[in-house]
Image: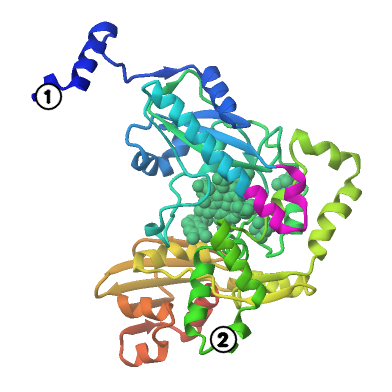
């Protein structure tokens, strides 16, 4: 049978003859599209065109997801407040997983509805799964907070979460990518709903949110993601490196094993969302705070701070120092964060993420790296005034120059080979003071 005689082809040709060729250049009415999103289950929705300069960093990933993307619909899903505030974290986890399921189902419903109208579109993932093969790089393909801000749905507060002017920061985000223009896109809100009350700073058990606005990703991640990602890898390695059940039980409590089981059977769980739970910003929440500020802190913030619980931190990290100095009633457990670079480029990229600024106190130096062998590359790390900058080549003059065989360096980072042995065999060579090398290592506890 020739293609022209195929029944579906004939049907299509008849359709085109009756209604004209299919138009792929859609322009959707913003109001109508927003109503569709809300009817499908979103609490709010806004739109942003892909060419917005603020999206330049993520444009390649958006086009990787769907090459014909022209607009992104950002969707907001409200979390119920008391389940977020309770000290019983199982309830909070249930709330997060319920809302993330709702977000994914809603985004999928929107895609189904628009696809039937001949519009190409794609729902991204609200939370996990992300692209695991990109690990240790950026596994997620959309920066949801930036998209929501640009769509005019809220602004990031001191706690780095998007605060919706009505619902506050107790929201989750999802997106639908559209091969269509929208009649009216959103714009970043002029006013930030954040009250700068710093309750998020005071409640954070890992010290990740600092008084000066600095955010330490790795402190939050190591504790919060104990059962996820690198925390999970560390647990697996603890199992395989334990000689017998007795040794395993010494290293992992029964409660922690049960928690891992919950995480594996129910879906990803977190250990903390307190910076979100205590935030009084947004019209739905602010009244409760303004009418009795002292009472608000007493009833909400104090119990969270007082709770006896385990806080996970890397030995020698800023989080460990924070817990020891301020939260001595909490149990501190030293763990590995599992952030182990698998390439020399990945090593350089990971430096700003794992940098512990308080451990760098007093260190002002430039470090040059030259990797040779399987993965040759150069890089510079400048540490100055508790800040780090990383460059992809040699920049400035080095206080310390490290030359290393790339495979040996990665094995050293993975604790599979010792530094003295690598120095003796000249697989790693250092030009500069060994003290500087030690000071550098202190900034990146793993
Ligand atoms: C990575 C991530 C984290 C990291 C970093 C958090 C952060 N502030 O960026 C960690 C593990 C710490 C984390 C924790 C939490 N998260 Co989170 N997280 C994300 C994710 C996947 C990307 C965020 C992002 O793009 N940040 C980039 C920008 C905005 O920050 P940046 O300073 O420019 O970039 C830095 C990081 O990206 C980091 N980085 C880069 N590569 C890598 C690789 C690794 C392995 C790590 C750890 C970091 C890292 O370094 C960059 C430079 O400093 C988003 C989902 C998504 N797809 O967008 C959810 C998201 C931001 N998280 C969310 C939530 C709810 C949480 C938690 C409350 C935990 C929970 N219950 O899920 C806490 C809150 C912590 C906080 N105060 O921010 C919500 C926030 C909703 C809102 N109201 O804004 C989001 C949007 C998920 C969702 N779909 O709803 N999260
Ligand atoms: S808790 Fe206060 S400072 Fe922190 S984000 Fe909310 S309003 Fe801003
Ligand atoms: S989620 Fe918890 S640990 Fe992470 S920044 Fe917020 S309060 Fe701190």
Q: Would you name the residue on which mark 1 appears?
A: 3
171 w.r.t. 429: above or below: above
The question of residue 316 being in magenta is answered with: no
Label 1 beta carbon less than 8 Å to ligand 1: no
State the image coordinates of residue 89 (x, y, percent, origin top left): 71, 58
Span colored in magenta: 80-96
As drawn, which residue projects farthest toward the top? 18
Q: Marks 1 and 2, how far apart in space?
A: 66 Å
Place of residue 184 in the rendered image (x, y in percent of width and height, measured from the top left): 51, 20
Disc 2 element: helix
Of 66 and 357, nearer the camera is 66
Residue 201: image quadrant is bottom right
- Number of the label disc, if any, that sits on residue 245: 2
Q: Which mark is residue 180?
A: none
Ligand 1 under 8 Å from disc 2 Cβ: no
Relative side of 405 to 227, left or right? left
Task: Answer with mark 1 or mark 2, whichever residue precedes in sequence.
Answer: 1
Front residue of 166/210: it is 166
Place of residue 378 in the rendered image (x, y in percent of width and height, measured from the top left) = 32, 67
Q: Is residue 205 above or below residue 49?
A: below
Question: From what the image shows, is residue 318 above or below residue 405?
Answer: above
Q: Is residue 276 left or right of residue 434?
A: right
Where residue 435 appears, as percent x and y from the top left, is 50, 84
88 in magenta: yes
- Asked whether 225 or 321 is in front, the reply is 225
- Quadrant location of residue 314? bottom right
């Amino acid at each position: 049978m020739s293609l022209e005689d195929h029944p579906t082809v004939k049907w299509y040709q008849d359709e085109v003859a009756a209604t004209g060729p299919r138009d792929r250049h859609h322009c959707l009415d913003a109001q109508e599209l927003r109503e569709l999103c809300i009817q499908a289950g979103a609490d709010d929705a806004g739109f942003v065109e892909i060419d917005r300069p603020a999206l330049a960093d993520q444009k390649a990933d958006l086009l990787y997801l769907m090459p014909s993307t022209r607009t992104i619909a950002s969707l907001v899903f409200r979390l119920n407040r008391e389940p977020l505030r309770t000290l019983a974290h199982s309830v909070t986890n249930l709330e997060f997983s319920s809302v993330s399921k709702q977000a994914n189902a809603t985004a999928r419903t929107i895609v189904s509805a628009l696809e039937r109208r001949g519009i190409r579109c794609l729902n991204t993932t609200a939370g996990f799964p992300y692209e695991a093969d990109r690990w240790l790089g950026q596994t997620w393909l959309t920066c949801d907070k930036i998209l929501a801000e640009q769509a005019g749905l809220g602004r990031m507060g001191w706690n780095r979460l998007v605060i919706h002017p009505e619902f506050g920061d107790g929201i989750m985000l999802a997106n639908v990518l559209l091969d269509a223009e929208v009649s009216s896109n959103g714009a970043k809100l002029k006013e930030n709903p954040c009250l700068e009350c710093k309750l998020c700073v005071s409640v954070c058990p890992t010290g990740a949110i600092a008084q000066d606005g600095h955010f330490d990703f790795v402190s939050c991640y190591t504790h919060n993601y104990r059962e996820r990602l690198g925390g999970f890898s560390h647990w697996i390695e603890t199992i395989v490196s334990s000689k017998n059940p007795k040794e395993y039980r010494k290293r992992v409590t029964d409660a922690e094993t049960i928690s891992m089981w919950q995480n594996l059977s129910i879906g990803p769980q977190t250990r903390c969302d307190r910076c979100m739970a205590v935030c009084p910003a947004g019209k739905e929440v602010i009244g409760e705070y303004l009418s009795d500020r002292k009472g608000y802190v007493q009833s909400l913030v104090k119990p969270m701070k007082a709770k006896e619980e385990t806080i996970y931190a890397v030995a020698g990290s800023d989080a460990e120092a924070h817990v020891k100095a301020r939260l001595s009633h909490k149990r501190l457990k030293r763990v590995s964060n599992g952030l182990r670079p698998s390439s020399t480029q990945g090593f350089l990229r990971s430096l700003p993420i794992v940098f512990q600024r308080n451990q760098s106190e007093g260190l002002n130096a430039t470090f040059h790296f030259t990797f040779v062998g399987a993965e040759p590359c150069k890089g510079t790390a400048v540490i100055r005034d508790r800040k780090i900058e990383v460059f992809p080549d040699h920049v400035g003059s080095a206080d310390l120059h490290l030359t290393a065989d790339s495979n040996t360096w990665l094995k050293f980072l993975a604790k599979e080979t010792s530094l003295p042995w690598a120095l003796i065999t000249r697989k790693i060579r250092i030009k500069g003071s060994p003290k500087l090398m030690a000071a550098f290592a202190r900034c990146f506890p793993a």
